[in-house]
Amino acid sequence: MLSRVGLLCDRILKSDKIMEIGPSYNPLMPKREGWQCYSIDHTDQRGLVEKYRHDPTVNVAMIEPVDFVWSKGTLSDAIPAEHHGTFDVLVASHVLEHIPELLGFLQSAEVVVRSDGRMVLALPDKRVCFDFFRPLTTTGDLLEAHWEGRARHSPKTLWDYFAYQVTKNSSPGWGRTDRASAVFTYTLDDAFTWTKKHDSDAYIDAHCSIFVPASFALIMFELARLGLTDWLIERSEAAEYTEFYVWLRRGALKKVAAMSEIEFTTERSRLLEQIVLELSDQARQLTSTQVSCREHDLTVARLQEAGLELVARLEKAQTELTNARSTVEVMRASRAWRIRSHLRRLMRLPATLSDM
C-alpha cells in the first residue's frame, strides 16, 4: 500500500516540471531528493524559517528555498510569464481551502500548466476534521467571492471558522470510526473577537471552503458546465484520516459541453445524492456517543416526568381515600345510622327467608 506521499506523487516523474503550492516547512517533492519542483509560498525561505523558528514540532532545516512569492493578486501574477503554460503538474496539500477566491485560483492555474497539465490536491474532509459542524461550500459561494474579487476572508467566514471549529481527543483531525465527542476549540466570545478583526490590516487566515469528495466534484462539474473552468476530475479518494485526495487534468470544458441536458442533469443529481450519503458518515459518528447519550437523557427525563405524574396521582388518591374514611366515620357515629342498622341487616337476608 502506498504511503500518503507515495499516493500523491504517484504517476509524477522527477523529470516533470512541477509546481508545489504552499509547501511551507514540509514539501512533498523536495528539491534535495531530485524533484524538478518549483515552490510558491506566501513568503520567502527566510520568512518561513522565522515563522516556524519557535515551533518545537517543525524542523526548520527542512524548509527549502522559495522560487516564487505569492502575497497578492492571482497565482499566475506571481509567476513570471516565461513559465506560463510550461508546468506539467501542480501540487497543493491543504491549500485550496484557505484561498478567499477559489474560482480565480482554478482559472489562474490553467494559465501556468500545459494544455495537458494535471493538478493533484489534498483537501480537508469535513466529516473527519475540525470543520465537522460547518456547512458545505457551494458553487454559489465561489461565484460570489469571484464577482466580489475577494482577497480577504469575509466576516461570515471568520465567524464560521472560529465559532464552529472543533477537535476530538484534542486533535484537529481524526479517523472515520472515531466516536469521541467533539469539543469546541474557541469560545463564542473568542469567535466574535476574531470576526471583528476582519477589516484590520493583518491578514487573518481561515478555512473558507468546506468539502466532502462529492461536493467538490459537484462544484467542479457545475463550473465546467458554465464554461468557467477546464479542470476535470479523473479520480478522487478518501483517506482514512482527516482528508481526501483529488487528481485533475485539463479537458472538462470539452467533455461537459458535449453532454446532453439529460446527461448533465442526471450526473448532477447523482452527485447531490452522493453528498447526502457522504454526510451520513457524520451521523454515524454521533450514533454511539452524543445521540445515544441524548436519547438516554430524553428517556430518563420522560421516566422522571411519568414518575412525578404517578406520584401526584397517588397523593391525590390518598387524599380522596382519607376524606372518604372521615365521611364514613361521621356517618357511623350519627343517630340515623344506628336507627337504620336493623333495616340494613334485613336487606342482607337471603331471598328465601324474606318470602317466608
Image (tube, rainbow, N blue to C red):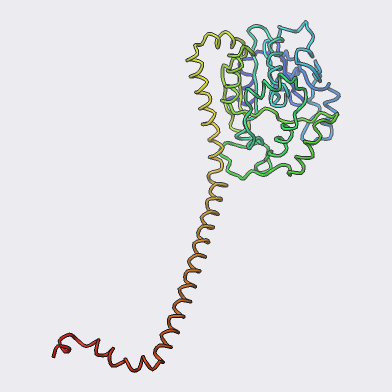
Estimate the x, y position of residue 54 in percent, counting from the top left: 84, 35
Relative height, residue 286 to residue 348 (above, below): above
Relative height, residue 55 to residue 87 (above, below): below
Estimate the x, y position of residue 336 in percent, counting from the top left: 36, 91
Answer left or right for 200 relative to 221: right
Q: The N terminus lies in which quarter of the figure?
A: top right
Estimate the x, y position of residue 170 in percent, counting from the top left: 69, 43
* Residue found farthest to the left: 356
Answer left or right for 149 relative to 323: right
Closer to the camera in the image, 238 or 57: 238
Q: Residue at x 73, y 36 (%)?
A: 159
Answer left or right for 112 relative to 256: right
Number of numbered labels in the structure image: 0
**Rendering quarter of residue 102:** top right
Closer to the camera in the image, 104 or 324: 324
**Rendering quarter of residue 245:** top right
Q: Residue at x 73, y 24 (%)?
A: 100
Answer left or right for 313 relative to 62: left
Relative height, residue 304 to residue 34 (above, below): below
Estimate the x, y position of residue 155 in percent, counting from the top left: 75, 32
Q: Residue at x 63, y 22 (%)?
A: 139
Q: The C terminus lies in which quarter of the figure?
A: bottom left
